[in-house]
Amino acid sequence: MKKLFYLLFLMTTLSFSSNPTPTTISDVTVYLSGAQVTRTATIKLPVGTTEFTFDKLSPYIQEASIQVSGLKSASILSINFGINYLSKQNQTESVEAFQDQIKSFLDKIQMEDGLIAGFNEELSVIQSNRHLGNDSQVVNLEKLKQFTDYYRTRITEIKSSIYASEKKKHSFQKEISDIQKQLAELNVNDKVQTGEIKIKLNASTATTLDIIIKYNVINAGWFPIYDLKADKINAPLQLAYKAHVYQSTGNKWENVKLTLSTSDPNTNNLKPEVNTKYLNFISHNTYYNNNATKSYNYKYNPMVQTVSGIVTANDGSPLPGVNVIEKGTTNGVQTDFDGNYTLKISTGNELVYSFIGMKSESLPIHSSIMNVSLDEDVAMLDEVVVTGYGTRRYANTSSVTTVTSENIENSLAGKVAGVQIIQSGGRPDDRPIIKFRGVGSTNTGMQPLYVVDGQIYDEYQINNIDPNDVIDARLLKDATSTALYGSRASAGVMIITTKKGEYTTNGDVIEQGITNTRFEIKKPYTIPSDGDVTVIEIENYSVPATYAYFAAPVLNENVFLTAKIGNWEQYNLLPAEANVYFEGSYSGKTNINPMATTDSLTVSLGVDPNVVIKRTELNDFKKNQYIGSNKIINKKYELELKNNKQTNIDLVLFDRIPISQNRDIKVEDIEIGNANYDSEKGIMEWKVNLKPNDKSTYSFSYSIKYPKYKRVNL
């Protein structure tokens, strides 16, 4: 009796929703990466415990972000999120129409296959019954002609019909292929499953609830883009602030209230702890990363297909040979002689820039133009050698680049300092012996240890390397080689880097800092789940700007038009790409980077070919001299400006005089004319006003004195 009572009690207090409860998306807050979706639903809650299932949701929900409100006196017992692998997302009407067309064409192809099979069967019957008459009866000529005419006519008709059906099939297949390409363009994925949220509620009284469910999803976001329009100099700059919104969450956002937020809930929000740093002696070479984690506001832009830019040193000079690679892939390029690169993006979200002697940079792919400046790595006191056991520093190394010869061993002779090739026998196939200068005679006949891309190679593997693939070779000798590789390195160690091994990354850059600017869009928007961009205009600004021309011929012999914007903080700008329109014409792209502590923001509007600058070194200024143990090099440069425009221009001209970082290197006899000179940085500045067709010339000179037996990076 007690068991029966308990069972009846459970039946009255515990019930389950037999059918999924429908929900509607009402609001979406789109972050720079990810989005928060708000759904509403009306439920009838009986007395006791009830479980509700909300289906047809995105499979990309972050479970920890699920929130439920509007419960009144009801209480939540559990919330669970899962994937329903038997349910598929609803497709849009246009996608369903495309898919119906494919089914129709497949039916037509099946019909033509049936006709072709019938024709082939008939052809087989005709061909197997071509025998006329028998052994005792001869077919006369007239009847033979009738038979042959029939066979010829019918076989021709059958083959023509088969050809026509094959032609139709080919046409249908082409139609299917075109539709499938269009579906691919729409990012349609038939395999996307659905997500489900199950909520178990308990109520003491029956009630009707209007509940609100919020959750975060991935595969969505927005990125800013700007249009800069300048009709003429001295007029305000027109700035159109636009948002490119995208999502591939599996659910269509239809007529939703949209809010754009500049925050990123996926950012690492844990503050660092500053602890005491202790100094002590160490027994081996160890590299410590003393660099702070950098803060970037750049966010990944999935619409960027190709990235171009220039990589420079911190002094502005271009860096050739910098490795630029998509993080997590083997897709990469090297910068050319002028530091320029262009890379077609495949699947990566970040680009890693690495160069020997420089700190590597890792940046999200945020723009089709990414110019990067690399800082010197002061921790690299000596040359860096990448080994199979880690990254260490050695002072006693020699290097050679671009080894190109028919034999890897012979190609090193005369190219790497200290390498000597000795033929070991008289036969043509005898392998040569490679010796390094400084290795003792007790090691005669021993081969060096080869380390290729961090892996140890034997003397036979080394000759399988294509010399054209070798980009760098370094020689370790004396105690440095045996300290790392032991007795195997007693004949020396050759560190070889090939094109296969040149792409390396040196860790991640974690983005820090969260902004909280929100743009609430009044007009409801529909954003399909196809990954394509929906453009939303946030604001139009008429921005007061000061226009000026900029020239730094020491780095780039072009003259740039710039606009300086004051009080720029009020516009809530983010780092992004901008389309530039000047005097009604498209002038190209630039980048806006408001990550500055200055009071004004300077934007480059492009090159003006009507203002010309030329920088010339005067070789006949003074001859180089030797005084005692010192060498003196004299330098003089002339800067010539020409205004070919029909209006006056204001121009700021920059150049520089080197600053010594060594007491044995002295920069003297500095002549700067009428330039404003920052003696700490060595930067000269001229403020120039040029009339139409006017020309102006500026010059400066200096001398450098240093010990004659040393070399200086002039």
Image: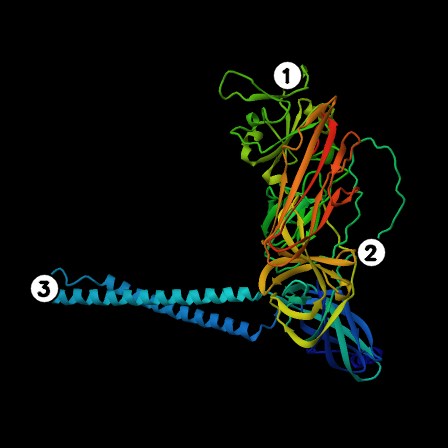
Residue 444 is labelled as: 1
Q: Nearer the viewer, mark 1 or mark 2?
A: 2
Task: Left or right? Give the position of 518 relative to 94.
Answer: right
Pointer 2 residue: 270
Q: CA distance from mark 3 to mark 1?
A: 99 Å
Q: Position of residue 592 (x, y in %)?
A: 69, 58
Pointer 3 residue: 141
Q: Position of residue 48 (x, y in %)?
A: 81, 80
Mark 1 closeness class: few <14, some 14–19, many ≥20 residues within 10 Å: few
Q: Nearer the viewer, mark 2 or mark 3?
A: 2
Query: Where is residue 624, by image quadrant?
Result: top right
Q: CA distance from mark 1 to mark 2?
A: 59 Å
For the point 88% across and 42% down, the residue is 277
Q: Nearer the viewer, mark 3 or mark 1?
A: 1
- Of mark 3 and mark 1, the one earlier in the sequence is 3
Q: Can you say which quadrant of the picture contains the N terminus?
A: bottom right
- Of mark 2 and mark 3, the one earlier in the sequence is 3
Mark 3 closeness class: few <14, some 14–19, many ≥20 residues within 10 Å: few
Q: Is residue 456 above or below residue 259?
A: above
Q: Position of residue 173 (x, y in %)?
A: 43, 65
Task: Left or right? Give the position of 5 relative to 407.
Answer: right
Q: Position of residue 339 (x, y in %)?
A: 62, 44
Q: Nearer the viewer, residue 239 or 7?
A: 239
Task: Left or right? Give the position of 127 relative to 76.
Answer: left
Q: Is residue 206 above or below residue 351?
A: below
Q: Amino acid at mark 2?
A: Leu
Q: Amino acid at mark 1?
A: Thr
